[in-house]
Image (cartoon, rainbow, N blue to C red):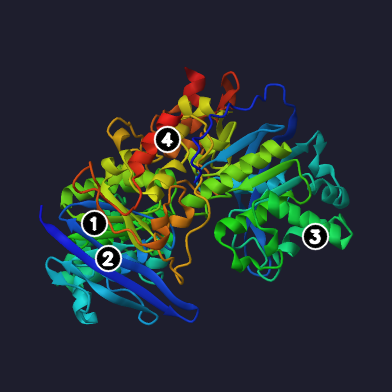
Amino acid sequence: MGVLMDVRDLTVRFYTQEGTVYAVNNVSYTLNEGETLGIVGESGSGKSVHALAIMGLIPTPPGKIESGEVYFEGRNLVGLSNEQMRLVRGKEIAMIFQDPMTSLNPVLTIGTQITESLKLHEGMNTAQANKRAAELLDLVGIPDAHKRLKDYPHQFSGGMRQRVMIAIGLSCNPKLLIADEPTTALDVTIQAQILELVKSLKKEFNMAIIWITHDLGVVAELADTIQVMYAGSIVERGPTKVVFQDPRNAYTLGLMRSLPRMDGTRTRLTQIEGSPPDMRIPPKGDPFASRNPYATERCFEERPPLKPVEGSDPNHLAAAWYDLRAILKKERENV
Amino acid sequence: MSVAVAHPEKRKNLENSDVILSVRGLKKHFPINSGFLIQRQVGAVRAVDGISFDIYRGETLGLVGESGCGKSTAGRTILQLYKPTEGHVFFEGQDLAMLGPNAMRQMRRQMQIIFQDPFASLNPRMTVGNIISEPLAIHGLYPDKRERQEYVESLMQKVGLNPYFINRYPHEFSGGQRQRIGIARALALNPKFIVCDEPISALDVSIQAQVVNLLEDLQSELGLTYLFIAHDLSMVRHICDRVAVMYLGKIVEMGPTDEVYDNPLHPYTQALLSAVPVPDPASKESRQRIIISGDLPSPARPPLGCNFNTRCPVVFEYCYHEPDPEFIEATPRHFVACHRVTEV
């Protein structure tokens, strides 16, 4: 599998009246063809902003890509003109958003909205585009696809709207689909439907997916690689199974421990104290240090780099000055 | 995050608890009106369509279901924030529908609610101190200014807020802290029963555990009874003693939490539980997932026969014709409404 996208040192800031927000700080990673990457983080962790930066959708001003490059199939997307970017969006990289009600145009029919990119990118005429649009709706599991092309977004339920968004995203066979919390607003039964759909489409089209979420359960289900973000930086990254079994960053561990267990053991939830830092005044060292019970003095002074983890999978990276594995081993021995 | 390994907690022993709240045949229909100038009712949204259950003193009863199933409406109708269309709610034996406005206001001191959205449920123009003390002012408690302030400060301390911030405004707090303000306000009148209407859904993952732990601590300290409305099934399993599953305005299954989760009888409960993503990549292969197709039907036009017949994976002909399945006790304390279960 070749490298599809290479994000290098991406830094995004927002210059607001209340001060500079350090939204994304030196984010670097690579994404392979056909890989599913799950990005986990809380609100304000920079996970959505970094995706908008890849798509060239950062509102400027107040936002600005301060530095960094995004190589997509070898071409740097940062610095492309709006016209050039428009040929990438929808065609090479498609994005679906959290709220399908606000991201669909309420006064245009679903058919118009799906055929828009087909006509623009694929040069289809109206008849061809309509035919393809109906096929796409059928593919994402909307019954009576042909008739429903004439319907407006409000005539669809939340789950159906999200299917329409996915159909629009898939319309030009993109190589990368970025999904920003696409199931957060949906009920679990509908979420399960969408997850099954995405899994089967991924197999069919062999596209890479970046799935942004705060739900570790969804990542466990879907992703090949997990990437945990905190305060605008990647704090841990690796193959999903490896990271779930052997987390090396205290924030990753905290997230996992704060979840209730579905198997029925009722232990008190382990909570992460405090709240995320204000990114207008980013802390000097490790941004998680003040909430981290394992923090060492160095954590407060110096930011840990993201580097390969000793004694684990070669693709497992973590940013920590402490040795979480040794700490946890000691903890277990003491019990 | 605390370093200490969590202590296993035993389930509360509620065998001998008395009933604090009874709901009998509760319905809430919202009228659909049509016509210009002269309005007439052309239909009704059957948000809550005949639910009955008891809540025992000191327990947490979970009420779960998809959005639109009527769980929030049920919570608000129980507190008489909506006037019930039909049915009764008994709090410590008293029928709430029979109470006059003054008696009802007195009764509200016993029953409070915590709302989902900590951003919309706090008045942005009031200080934290005023928000928490407003119920006290309404009920004329702690008339002495200094005593009232001391009491508010003690409440803030109890929910983990620094009393130093008493004169600040809601926008100066984070989501989790705001939810703590909402909890302090609910506690101000020393209630016995609190409806928690999705108290953690709007919060970040790392903050949810803080609020859940706080709610559990307050329950054991003050002997509170909770009706915990949620759609996060794993959190419900963690916090609730019993759970009731709602679908389209009706309760389809109810029982002790472990019993319902380990041995779900209704096909809807089975599908709902199997849809929860498990944060463990290793279990992915071994799980059998039941995907139910389609969406929730409109509560303005519920299907004939069993409510769930449009999406049910094990539906049979009987389900379309017969009246609704009865709510029966299938195994001790485990109730279900399904023709499949009744038949076999």
Q: Which residue: 46% across, 29% down?
A: A335
Instruction: Sort mark 1 into few (<14), some (14-19) or many (20+) by Cα contacts within 10 Å.
Output: many
For residue A331, the mark is: 4
Task: Relative to A6, say whether B56 is above or below.
Answer: above
State the count of labels. Answer: 4
Residue A114 circle label? 2
CA gap, disc 3 and disc 2: 59 Å
Q: Which one is in front in this view, the residue at disc 3 or the one at disc 4?
A: 4
Residue B7 is at least partly visible in this image? yes
* Rendering coords of residue A89 (x, y %): 23, 70
Amino acid bearing label 1: Leu
Label 3, label 1: how far apart the Cα atoms are: 62 Å
Q: Is residue A290 above or below residue B93?
A: below
Q: In 3D space, how far apart are the residues under numbered discs 4 and 2 (Cα atoms)?
A: 55 Å
Query: Disc 3 residue type?
Result: Gln
Q: Residue at x 58, y 43 (%)?
A: B213
Residue situated in front as seen by the camera: A89 or A258: A258
Q: Earlier in the sequence, mark 4 or mark 2?
A: 2
Q: Residue at x 30, y 44 (%)?
A: A243
Does dot 1 land on a helix, a strand or a loop?
A: helix
* Amino acid at dot 2: Ile
Q: Give the label on residue A136, or none.
A: 1
Identify the residue at the far front of this view: A297
Residue B160 x, y percent position in the rendering:
64, 52
Instruction: Find residue B23 and report its horizontal and vertical position in percent.
Output: 70, 36
- Circles 2 and 1: CB distance less than 8 Å? yes
The label shown at residue B226 is: none
Name which residue type carries label 4.
Answer: Glu
Q: Are marks 3 and 2 in contact (CB under 8 Å)?
A: no
